[in-house]
Amino acid sequence: MSQPLETVSLAQRADLKQIAAWIEPSSSVLDLGCADGKLLAYLQAHKNIRGVGVERAPQAVVASVSRGVQVIQQDLEQGLALFDDQQFDTVVLSRTLQSMRNTEDILREMARVARYGIVSFPNFGHWSHGFSILAGRMPVSKEMPYQWYNTPNIHLCTFKDFEDLARSLGLRITHVAAFDANRPVRWLPSLRSRLAVYRFESPYAAR
């Protein structure tokens, strides 16, 4: 059973609140790397969505199930062969893209299984990162809290980097949001935001 409405909150994650705002009520959602299932639980409670999560960590799977979320335990690097073409309305990949070994493959699979995709990732183009590099150090921040030798973030990118990749894969970007901590950034987001959130339409959606 899902948690009561008042106990399911996205207050600490502005990117998840933005993602939730872009998802249509009563639609179907696949959340890749769903962690503790908080996003899907919120969407089930507030938007009546039909949701499925994919998560690798056993503890996170248990937490998702306890929230009433249907979850499949699997490593995303194995692909999404479990799911049919255009099975979902929206597929979400939150703060995980930068840690994927096969970035192009996961984006292609997202476009295959859903009409819309939403991704969020740390913006490597933030102005402070340039100063860190000029000082001879790799950047460390709340969004990228690891040292260079133990980071899971192997494919860092900027707004422009992602947009170029999306274009090359035929993904049509429909919405963009940017955040510094939990504050929206609208002026010079490519330099002033630490987190980017993109919504795109699959090239297969109209077929």
Image (cartoon, helix red, strand yellow):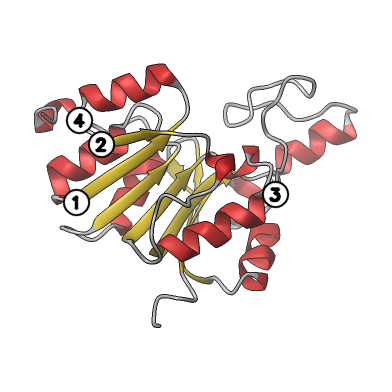
Name the foreground residue: 171 vs 70.
70
Q: Position of residue 1 (x, y in %)?
A: 10, 29
What is the secondary structure assignment of the residue under circle 4?
Answer: loop
Q: CA distance from mark 3 to mark 1?
A: 31 Å
Q: Which mark is residue 157?
A: 3
Q: Earlier in the sequence, mark 2 or mark 1?
A: 1
- The relative height of residue 117 versus residue 96 in the rendered view (above or below) is below
Q: CA distance from mark 2 to mark 1?
A: 12 Å
Q: Which residue is mark 2?
A: 70
What is the secondary structure assignment of the residue under circle 2?
Answer: loop
| For discs 2 and 3, the disc positioned in front in the rendered view | 2
Q: Residue furthest top?
A: 59
Q: Which mark is residue 8?
A: 4
Local packing at callout 4 (Cα closer than 10 Å; few below 14, some 14-19, many 20+) is some
Q: Earlier in the sequence, mark 2 or mark 4?
A: 4
Q: Badges 2 and 3: C-beta atoms under 8 Å apart?
A: no
Q: Badges 2 and 1: C-beta atoms under 8 Å apart?
A: no
Q: CA distance from mark 4 to mark 1?
A: 15 Å
Q: Amino acid at mark 1?
A: Ile
Q: Amino acid at mark 4?
A: Val
Name the foreground residue: 168 vs 191.
168
Name the foreground residue: 42 vs 75.
75
Q: Earlier in the sequence, mark 4 or mark 1?
A: 4
Q: Earlier in the sequence, mark 3 or mark 4?
A: 4
| For discs 4 and 1, the disc positioned in front in the rendered view | 1
Q: Which residue is mark 1?
A: 49
What is the secondary structure assignment of the residue under circle 1?
Answer: loop
Q: Earlier in the sequence, mark 3 or mark 1?
A: 1
Residue at horizontal 67 percent and vertical 64 percent from the top: 165
Quarter assignment of residue 169: bottom right
Q: Position of residue 187 (x, y in %)?
A: 55, 57
